[in-house]
Amino acid sequence: MKVGKAGSRAPVMPDVADMERAFIVSSSHLAVPGNEDLSEFEFALTVVNHAFHRWMARGMAATGLPNLSALDTLILHSVNHRNREKSISDLMFTLNLSERHYLNYAMKKLDEHALIQRERRGKEVFVSTTQKGRDVCLEYARLRRICLLEHIPQNREVGDVTIAEVAKALRVLTGFYEQASRSAASL
């Protein structure tokens, strides 16, 4: 044990510059040398994704709808976006859903709560929010301001990076993962 100031025997913290960078990953077999940062990013993305989904479900529960999932919540907000009806294909595209049955199941739940209405025109179905759906979205937004937005730093920075920069980087990385998915599907 190093001796601290004035001869005390209190432990001395090592100098940060002397410490080797430890990556926080969930799967060491994926943290191959030179790509540890990507493994750390993937783990962080997994954790933040689960936290975001938990928030959406808990936020919706706080509005009085405890049985709606994160996907149900995303779909409701997407349908409510700009108070314009959306086609099923637009919802699938916007939310990057590849399985229509996920959307159908969520819309069935939203229908049961009278949050959305559907209208068939030709071969396409269009969806819009009901007044109750719009009211739920407004209440969710109010709760979001109280529970989440009040904690976001005024300068909109997290770890010396603006939230907008993080969003931009995530959009770019989405393209990489989409391409990797297509490549894997062709193997």
Image (tube, helix red, strand yellow):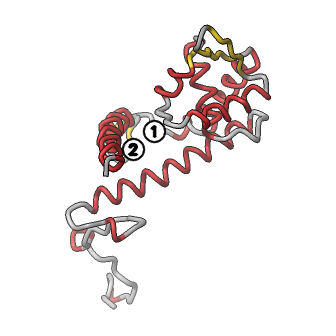
Rendering coords of residue 76 (x, y %): 64, 27
- Alpha carbon distance from label 2 to label 1: 8 Å
Image vertical order of residue 12 relative to residue 33, above or below: below
Rendering coords of residue 156 (x, y %): 41, 35
Task: State the residue at coordinates (38%, 89%).
Answer: 9
Residue found farthest to the top? 121
- Helix, strand or loop at disc 1? loop
Q: Which residue is mark 2?
A: 158
Image vertical order of residue 20 relative to residue 8, above or below: above
Image vertical order of residue 48 relative to residue 10, above or below: above
Closest to the observer: 115 or 57?
115
Look at the image and tell me in which quarter the N terminus lies: bottom left
Disc marking residue 153: 1
Q: Say whether marks 2 and 1 touch (CB < 8 Å).
A: yes
The crowding category of the residue bearing disc 1, from other C-alpha atoms within 10 Å (few below 14, some 14 to 19, many at least 20), is: few
Left or right of residue 158, residue 48 in this image: right
Rendering quarter of residue 128? top right
Task: State the residue at coordinates (38%, 84%).
Answer: 11
Residue type (three-letter) at the residue carrying disc 1 = Pro
Task: State the residue at coordinates (58%, 13%).
Answer: 123
Rendering coords of residue 98 (x, y %): 49, 36
Residue type (three-letter) at the residue carrying disc 2 = Val
